[in-house]
């Protein structure tokens, strides 16, 4: 699951495309916004986080190992579903892994046989499986289904998850949509998270830009896209989060899908974790930088209008592999666990969000009932000082680090006539010289003020620039 920093440069042109609104209005119900990908056996950790949803993998090959007449309900531990329901966590299913009997090649990434047959034809084994899966698990509370993973990655470019071309994946999605809706009216189909880097490195048009026309161009579609949500996966690079969201929004808006829900999967791999001596890092990220990235990505996602956010691979599945988890394979928690707790505690009630940026700094303002949350950090190799104006000397606020440490923040006499001052460290370069993760963020929580507009300045090397 390696990512390359080049995605930021490859997608920078997309930033000229404004997201659907300069100020994102967020209608997601409180408690449902933030989730995790994988790790269903880590119930206590998910509960401690306060995760509102959890994606787990439903392997087709495990449900039907020997043929279309099989259906092993226990392929998913029923205890996981009961625990999630009891804890108030929604389960989102991701369907993967074509059974060996269901394709000519027998490969788990293969295109299923009979995909072009009508969904009620027994030869369309994919339609029959989706229909039975949805009907079986809808009463258990599973209504959202992600169709495979990273279909944009081609042979030789990484882990091959789906070997078919764009048209084959479009057909896979369409059949799943029709079969799932027929099996249960509440079923919702999500496009797989895409790699993005693979297309950029190969000089190809983004996969989503090729997939959406294939789905909309179907003669039977009549304007229906055959999917209910798009998933954006952005990892390791702070800049890539906004650039990828902008690229996705641009593609959707070009096809009249500006209201299509977008979900964000994000994380950074802390390859410099002292407990992970076998990793071969693509670039060097410390556990503290992983924590910083989790806060930055969540804030940028809200400013980009995403409906939901999740940490992908939030637990390490293999102590010998590249680390990703907020929780290590031995059960210990990385600093990013505390950071995601902070995100859920402080960001979940957000009603609208707006991003401000210049060459030196970035700010996301989250508006909530009765308060405003300012998430701010240095973008590059210069430390900055944020000056947030106040209506009176002595106004009190709370300042949090990425990992949730809190201290009081009090406005002092300045020329406005008062202001809060927050120092932000520079971003650190990795061993390859890249600024992958921006500088450590600070989170300031202010009481709402109806009669005072807060102006924000940044001071860099003694020079002052207005940011908001």
Image (cartoon, helix red, strand yellow):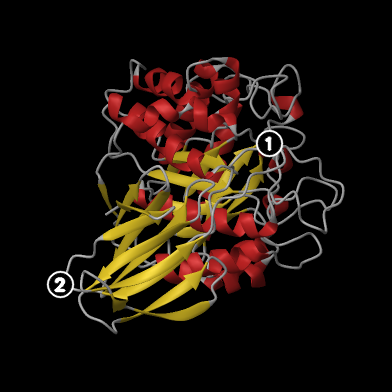
Q: Residues within 10 Å of mark 1 (few under 14, many from 20)?
A: few
- Vertically, is 290 above or below 251? below
Residue at 76% across / 56% down in the picture? 273
x 64%, y 37%: residue? 96
Tell me the quadrant of the picture where the C terminus can be found. Answer: bottom left
The residue at which mark 2 appears reads as: 450
Q: Nearer the viewer, mark 1 or mark 2?
A: 2
Residue 89 at what x, y percent from top left?
Answer: 52, 65
Q: Quadrant of the N terminus?
A: top right
Secondary structure of residue under mark 1: loop
Q: How far apart are the alpha carbons under marks 1 and 2?
A: 64 Å
274 sits left or right of 25 in the view: right
Residue 246's x, y, as percent? 38, 35
User: Is 44 left, or right, of 238 in this rendering?
Assistant: right
Looking at the rendered structure, the secondary structure element under dot 2 is loop
Using the rendered view, name the quadrant where residue 152 is placed: top right
Q: Nearer the viewer, residue 422 or 274?
A: 422
**What residue is pinned by disc 1?**
69
Question: Which numbered disc flags the more N-terminal residue, 1 or 2?
Answer: 1
Q: Position of residue 107 (x, y in %)?
A: 75, 24
Q: Is residue 263 above or below residue 253?
A: below
């Amino acid at each position: 699951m390696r990512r390359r920093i080049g995605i930021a440069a490859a997608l920078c042109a997309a930033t000229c495309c404004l997201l659907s609104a300069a100020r994102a209005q967020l209608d997601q119900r409180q408690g449902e916004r933030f989730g995790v990908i994988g790790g269903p056996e880590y119930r206590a950790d998910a509960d401690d986080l306060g995760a509102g949803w959890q994606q787990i993998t439903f392997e087709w090959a495990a449900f039907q190992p020997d043929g279309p007449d099989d259906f092993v309900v226990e392929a998913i531990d029923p205890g996981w579903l009961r625990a999630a329901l009891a804890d108030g966590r929604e389960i989102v299913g991701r369907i993967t892994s074509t059974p060996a009997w269901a394709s000519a090649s027998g490969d788990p990434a293969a295109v299923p046989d009979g995909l072009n047959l009508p969904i009620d034809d027994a030869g369309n084994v994919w339609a029959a499986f989706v229909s039975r899966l949805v009907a079986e698990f809808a009463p258990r509370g599973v209504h959202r289904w992600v169709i495979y993973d990273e279909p944009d990655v081609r042979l030789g470019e990484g882990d091959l998850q789906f070997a078919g071309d764009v048209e084959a994946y479009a057909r896979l999605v369409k059949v799943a949509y029709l079969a799932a809706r027929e099996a249960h009216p509440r079923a919702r189909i999500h496009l797989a998270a895409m790699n993005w880097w693979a297309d950029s490195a190969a000089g190809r048009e983004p996969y989503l830009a090729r997939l959406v026309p294939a789905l909309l161009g179907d003669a039977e579609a009549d304007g229906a896209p055959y999917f209910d949500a798009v998933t954006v996966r952005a990892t390791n690079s702070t800049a890539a989060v906004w650039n990828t969201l902008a690229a996705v929004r641009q593609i959707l808006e070009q096809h009249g899908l500006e209201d299509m829900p977008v979900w964000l999967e994000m994380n950074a791999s802390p390859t410099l974790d002292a407990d992970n001596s076998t990793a071969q890092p693509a670039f060097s990220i410390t556990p503290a930088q992983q924590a910083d990235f989790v806060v930055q990505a969540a804030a940028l996602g809200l400013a980009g209008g995403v409906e939901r956010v999740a940490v992908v691979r939030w637990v390490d599945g293999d102590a010998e592999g590249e680390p990703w988890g907020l929780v290590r394979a031995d059960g210990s928690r990385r600093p990013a666990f505390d950071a995601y707790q902070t995100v859920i505690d402080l960001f979940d009630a957000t009603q609208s969000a707006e991003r401000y940026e210049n060459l030196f700094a970035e700010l996301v303002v989250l508006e909530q009932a009765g308060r405003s949350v300012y998430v701010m950090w240095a973008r590059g190799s210069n430390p900055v000082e944020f000056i947030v104006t106040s209506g009176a000397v002595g106004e009190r606020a709370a300042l949090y680090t990425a990992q949730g440490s809190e201290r009081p923040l009090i406005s002092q006499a300045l020329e406005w006539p008062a202001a809060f001052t927050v120092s932000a460290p520079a971003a650190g370069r990795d061993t390859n010289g890249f600024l992958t993760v921006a500088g450590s963020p600070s989170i300031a929580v202010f009481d709402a003020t109806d009669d005072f507009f807060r102006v924000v300045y940044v001071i860099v090397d003694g020079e002052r620039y207005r940011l908001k």
